[in-house]
Image (cartoon, rainbow, N blue to C red):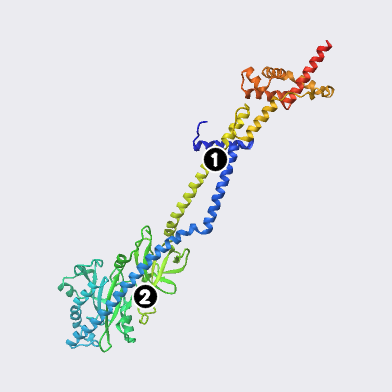
Amino acid sequence: MPKRGFIETLGLYREAIRRGGQNGLPMRLRLFLFLILFLNTIMLGVLLILFASGVFRTGLREHRPVLGSELAHIAQDIYKSFGSVSVQATDLSKELSAQLERNMKEHGATAASLQESPDLLEHLLEDELGRLTGALEKSDASGVFLLLDATVNPALPDGDVSRACLYLKNMEPNIVNGMAANLRLGFGPMAIARSHGIHALPQWQMEMDVGEVSDFTEVMAVAKEQKLPFSRLYRWSKAMVLPGSSDRVMLCTVPLIASDGTVFGVCGFEVSEMLFKLSYAPEPAGYDHLFCLLSPLEENTLRLSGALFAGNFAAGPAAPEHTQIDISSGSGGFYSYRQPEKEGYAGLHETVSLYPVDSAYGNEQWAVALMMPDKGLNTLISARSRNLILGLLVLMLVNVGLASFISHRYIRPVAAALEHLKNPDPAAKTKIPEIDDLIEFLAAQDELPISGESKELPVQEHFALYQEFAKNIKSLSAAEKTVFDLYVKGHTAKEIAEILCLSINTIKTHNRRIYMKLNVTSRKELMVYIQMMEEVDCANAANK
């Protein structure tokens, strides 16, 4: 038997099913369908177990420790870096407070009367330029500033909010060496910049408008009210855009306090969003939509308007537009972050302490969050699920192939044995005991001699049937009459096939037609009528 391809085999099954409604399904197809049902029932049971055990949700559990570890790493780095900048800002404030007070005393001025000496302001700022640049070089910041609570020209319309300031930015905060070459002046006297070879930023301004940077005035106000050490008076501002600038920054601001307790200005460091991104961008491979943010945390809500972002900005919300994200519990150990009528996010967050417990701003909470759009996380999870589903589909195809192979191997000898029944040969064995026994039984039945009990049959009772039988003999075709005559002579079907040089199948076809036309159901019944014919012929011959 030539081997068939898998597709051709399926085509044969499809054709067999189409004909099955009329003729019934063949054994091979029945076995094939049973095996498919059996194997796929087992696979369905496995699927139910997988669903019940949460295997299809393990994607979340797999990503949770990866992102949790990355979040812990970033939060620890932020805690250390911002803590270091806080300490450096506090130390800078102590040094500047003492040095500025000495300079003012040398010029006959005091911290309390600083506004009465506007000509002294530029000199005080320039004297501290070296201290500021040195502090910036040692810090993890992107800028440094010194602001005095006085203005060069109080008579100007905005003199009440304008303050003398020296604000220096490092344009390449990730560069360790050669920092001086990257300094730019953002606020301060242009004469200072020219005399020290420092270029000014395009948005340079002479003085700082503290009306737009309320943190400066608030820090000074708190320092006046609460007599605390410098280390308890520094404050990290929410992310903001400075006047005339486009960069988002966070400022660590510390008050300047004279020996008599007079608060006469502020100083501190800047952390720009560019530096934040360079320092804290998430690094896990394969998480293309992941981003990090440092945000104020208020009543389980992230205030994005005051947050810094790092990572994939295309995936993150635009802070000025979306002012808050509400936090709720998600699935798989993740949190769900939602904005009104905006895309949702999933991820993790943890609080980070930027102040000592007894700080003037110890009640302010900050959080470091690591998140991605819901669709990004779903893509990561579905990638694993797709592999699992693909594996199940492959397993299903293997089941179909296995069922086809088993049904073919099992039914092939049975089909061969059934084919052998059409031409029974007791000497040939099919190696299937039940079919071999059936062949031997049918062969024995075919060779049994006609018993004498037919002679004892009352001819009168069967005369009408015999007349009908004799009449029907005339309806036989020539080929059928030839086969019938050989049966009359006592030959078996096998002998008739050899005499007429026909196949046993052809003889059996003639047999069916002969039985149908003569209205008999078996060879034994046929031989009874033939015996009756012989008796009638003998009786007619005797009467003559």
Q: Is residue 479 above or below residue 41?
A: above
Which amino acid, by three-letter code, is at mark 2? Ser
Q: How many labels does the image show?
A: 2
Q: Nearer the viewer, mark 1 or mark 2?
A: 1
- Is 72 on the left-hand or right-hand side of 96? right
Distance between the alpha carbons at the discs numbered 1 and 2: 68 Å
Query: Can you see residue 209?
Result: no
Which residue does the numbered mark 1 point to in the structure image?
Answer: 406
Query: Can you see residue 16?
Result: yes
Which amino acid, by three-letter code, is at mark 1? Ile
Q: Is residue 515 above or below residue 277?
A: above
- Is 28 on the left-hand or right-hand side of 529? left
Q: Is residue 37 above or below residue 90?
A: above
Describe the element under mark 1 as helix, strand or loop.
Answer: helix
Comes first in the chain, label 1 or label 2 = 2
Which residue does the numbered mark 2 point to in the structure image?
Answer: 353
Residue 426 is situated, as x and y percent measured from the top left of the image, at: 63, 28
